Amino acid sequence: MKLVFFGTPDYVVPIVDGLLKHFRTNANPHPISAVITQAPKPSGREQFMAYSPVDEWAYNKKIPKFFDPMDLIKENIFADIGVLASYGQFIPDDVINHFKYGILNIHPSLLPLWRGASPIQASIISGDVKTGVSIIKLDDKLDHGPIVSQFKDEVLDSDTTETLRKRLFERSAEVIPGLIEAYVAGKITPKNQDEEKVTFTRQIKKEDAFIPPEYLSAVMQGATLQKEWGIPWIKVNKSVYSLQTSAHSVNNFIRAMDPWPRAWSNIKISRYKDIKILRIKILKAHVSIQQLTTNNPQL
């Protein structure tokens, strides 16, 4: 079995590492033919080039790596199947068709729920008690391909995006090697997604983490506003997803914005005749008797 892995962030390294360990044998000492990851980017004040965790992993394992998926074709690199997890770039049809068994995409939601770039955050914000991972056969549409397999997991009250994401991808690392073997052996028949149940998410921006001050003030006093809070990066039935503004929904929002970009709001400070608007960062909060309490907000 020869594979190519597409991925970028640290939390998918256990997946590619698990694939290497599972499929490496004396007869097949190099099962990962190549890794495709995002190119290094300037980072920090000094603007040093920062390489992705998957890039560093491939370098340490002496596995060929590329930044452009089309390089697989240009360099005549062949593999039986591709595995994609949080790669973050478009994959051309020519690359998908380059593999005998296509590319399997590991997506952290129960598709067709929460397609797109921010499924874990959407699951926490919407108050889902169950989420999971879908392994789908990649096609030319966003998270649209037929479902090869799914597994479920609980969304804990204490979960942040970081903790839930870590747990889902660690479980994926355990599941995917055996699943690939069964899929390649023809033991699994993929099933089309139900297009009537599709919901979408987009990439979150820093400004998306803003909590309107009037909402924050109300829930910290134990009030529930009748006004709905629109979340522009989540779409349900092609409309912006809305939350009822309560202590629990704001707490869910804060958890979803952890570790990035972190929930924030503005506070007004009056001193004599001077009025200042200060930005505060809300790292943690908790709910007690329908009232939200923030834990050590930062200016």
Image (tube, rainbow, N blue to C red):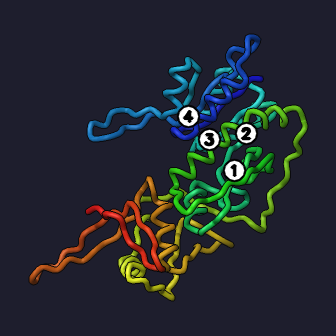
Q: Is residue 281 left or right of residue 131?
A: left
Instruction: Name the N-terminal-most of marks 4 and 1.
Output: 4
At label 2, the amino acid type is Val
At label 1, the amino acid type is Val
Residue 170 is labelled as 3
Nearer to the camera, 76 or 166: 166
Distance of mark 3 from mark 2, alpha carbons? Answer: 9 Å
CB within 8 Å, label 1 to label 2: yes
Residue 16 percent location from the top left of the image: 63, 31
Instruction: Name the N-terminal-most of marks 3 and 4.
Output: 4
> At 48% from the left edge and 61% from the top edge, which residue is drawn?
255
Q: Secondary structure at mark 2?
A: helix
The residue that mark 4 highlights is: 37
> At 58% from the left edge and 56% from the top edge, which residue is drawn?
120
Q: Is residue 277 left or right of residue 158?
A: left
Q: Secondary structure at mark 4?
A: loop
* Foreground: disc 2 or disc 4: 2
CB within 8 Å, label 3 to label 2: no
